[in-house]
Image (tube, rainbow, N blue to C red):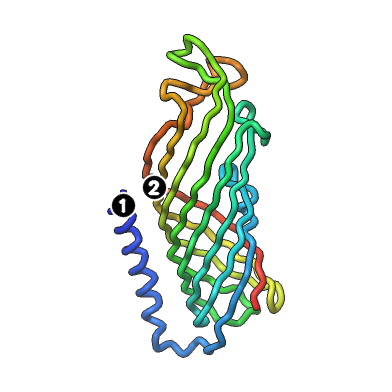
Amino acid sequence: MKKKLLFFLILMSGIVYSSNAQDDNDNDYNEKEPTLSLFINTTALLHPKLSGLVLGGEYRWKPHLGIHQQLGYVFTDYDAANDNFDNSRKRRGFRTSSELRRYFNSFDRTVSNSYLGLQLRYWKYKETGEFEFCRENCQFQQFLEYELNQYALGAGLSTGAVSYLGEHFFIDYGLTLGAMYRKNQSNIPQDATRVRNGSPGLNEPNPQNFEVSEAYFLCYLKLGYSF
């Protein structure tokens, strides 16, 4: 998986680099002073599995090049028995991402500015809770307290646009497509399945120890202020 992520990263780096190279002698951009922006990722507050507060900033040293960085705290609480938010299961951790962006349109803040970005993302969280588990092919059930740690590393290609609401406030919206490696470590017995609503017929797999490589897709909406 590490080789696949490296290949994917090199491929996307080439796309962004080739896009930047064609503008080395481009005079369509009026050179400006470096700018700094701060923002909040509003969609992170509604994430079904990693909800939390995610804040970030972007530094643009050229009108069409910027480093986009965000960092957040995960505080997801919910009840797996009915999928409602409750205190029976908690996730606490952090998530972060770094993105190199190449903007295409004018630096004029009166128009939308589309971009292409190369993104790296990482998260780590701990999940704790207590559930009723079905053991040994449901020969008996028992309540168990458990602890689970998940780590994830991914790389993706982002595309979107920034639209200004006046001179300073803006909306940043877009999507990211990429590949991710995730690893779970838990102390749950591997023969256990979680019981839903007290019925063995509605069991769901427990979050067992595993390593998986997968594609990911996400959409986002950020609100920010540019100095």
Residue 149, image x, y percentages: 48, 40
Q: For residue 56, which quarter of the picture?
A: bottom right
Task: Return the disc, 1 or 2, that comes first in the chain's sequence.
Answer: 1
The label shown at residue 181 is 2
Q: Secondary structure at mark 2?
A: strand
Q: Residue at x 45, y 62 (%)?
A: 119
Graded by Cα atoms within 10 Å as few (under 14), some (14 to 19) or many (20 or more), the crowding at tag 1 reads few
* Closer to the camera in the image, 200 or 22: 200
In the picture as drawn, the residue positioned furthest to the right comes out as 166
Residue at the spot of label 1: 2
Left or right: residue 223 versus residue 69 is right
Q: Secondary structure at mark 1?
A: helix
Residue 213, image x, y percentages: 37, 44
Pointers 1 and 2 in contact (C-beta within 8 Å): yes
Q: Is residue 204 above or below residue 28?
A: above
How far apart are the alpha carbons under marks 1 and 2?
Answer: 8 Å
Q: Amino acid at mark 2?
A: Tyr
Q: Is residue 79 above or below residue 40?
A: above
Residue 102, image x, y percentages: 47, 73
Q: Residue at x 48, y 12 (%)?
A: 138
Residue 58, image x, y percentages: 56, 71
Graded by Cα atoms within 10 Å as few (under 14), some (14 to 19) or many (20 or more), the crowding at tag 2 reads some
Q: Residue at x 63, y 54 (%)?
A: 53
Q: Residue at x 47, y 27 (%)?
A: 188
Q: Amino acid at mark 1?
A: Lys
